[in-house]
Amino acid sequence: MSDVPNLDPQQLRSWLNRAAQHDAAAFRLLYDATSAKLFGFALRILGKRELAEEVLQESFVAIWHNAGTYQSHLAAPMTWMTTIVRNKAFDLLRRSDVATEIDGDPFDAAIMDALHDPAATPIEALELSRDAAALAYCMSVLDGAHRQVLGLAFFHDLSHSEVAQQMALPIGTVKTWIRRSLDKLKTCLTKGARP
Amino acid sequence: MNIRDNAPLREKLAAEYVLGTLKGGARRRFESYMHNDAALRLLTVEWQERLAPMAEFAPAVQPSQQVWAGIERRLNLRPARTGWLASLNFWRGLGIASTAVAALLAVVISTRVLDQPQLDYVATLTDDKAHTALVLTGDTQHKALTVRLVGNAPVASDKTLQLWAVPKQGNPRSLGLLADKGEVRLALGSNAIGDDVALLAVSLEPKGGSPDPNGPTGPILYKGAWVRVM
């Protein structure tokens, strides 16, 4: 992850604004800065390079066309772009009936280690953006199984009952875990908790 | 159900909408609520801000270069060119700088730049198929070297292009790092333009340039020679 270029929100916002005015050079810079992150994310959802590349291409075409509607006062640029990638990836899954492999751990091993035991693998070592590091910290405080439930839902577009099936849990338990985990995350992130 | 006055429910639905567990009819109903409820939209954006960074928990992976090529094709994006260098389009087809071409370039340059910096050196660097990839212009008076990429030469994000002056004898001398598109201005010193410079070359190097101070470590992608035009 060390070669991930500058994801400074100010910079990304400025490229997005210029792309909205059909500045192809700014759009290319935006692509260079974010494509590896977004591709990694699409790959995590879809599992296959060719599908993830299709989604990345679709997403950037959408980003170009919709840059003018991006409201910088509402969402951070990476939030806006990852939401587009996630929607496109889930669309593709629904459309194509591709079976993706859902492994037990929805998170990268390094992230998982850091979440399990922040003392052994400091979250700061993961080179995450500030928002992601804060979220990682807040998720590390959750119970491991609760965290897994959130990850399955987020990365694999699963419903309550699908998560329940995947984890062999009663659906009521899954619903409760998700509700409590989301509450805890909100409280933790609002506090601006730091590792 | 009226959700407008039910703050905990609004919060729960917004969070689960973003997480993705709100499905089917409930999801569509939530979207129709959002349509007429700006506060609910804001609540949803706040949850996006909280949860979307989970995307970063997946490691970054470099996509293949075809992805950008496909985007560029679908959106019909062309590299922007400005100023008199737009005439480089004209040079692109000329291929390798033979003596005849060099003479022609000299005419093009000297007639186009009367009011411009004193561009007294020019070099076209070509790839192994003799397609022009870069045009260098040297202005000895202002000691300025401008390198312009003709078209796109996409470079992986962990690589960079490095420009070298290769002397008749001794080690190549680095003239600087190039962007993978557009224009780069470098200092023009005697190390770049001296009489002993036999060749200009561009190599593909790790980000930050060749780790070897004595020369390139990666493949030579483009080469060419200076032509004195004035």
Image: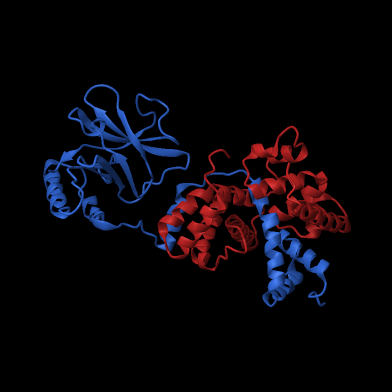
Q: Colour of chain B?
A: blue
Q: Can the viewer see residue B170 in this picture?
A: yes
Kindly identify the residue that appears in the image at 36 percent across and 59 percent down: B78
Q: Which quarter shows the C terminus of chain A?
A: top right
Corner quadrant of residue B197: top left
Which one is in front, B118 or B176? Answer: B118
Residue at screen point 54% across, 47% down: A36
**Frontmost residue, B198 versus A16:** A16
Q: Quadrant of residue B215?
A: top left
Chain letter for red? A
Left or right: A60 with respect to A119? left
Q: Is residue A36 left or right of residue B100?
A: right
**Residue drawn where x is 74% and y is 74% of the image:** B29
Asked if A32 appears above or below B80 in the picture, the reply is above
Q: Position of residue A126 (x, y in %)?
A: 64, 39
Up-down relation of residue B219 to residue A34 (above or below): above
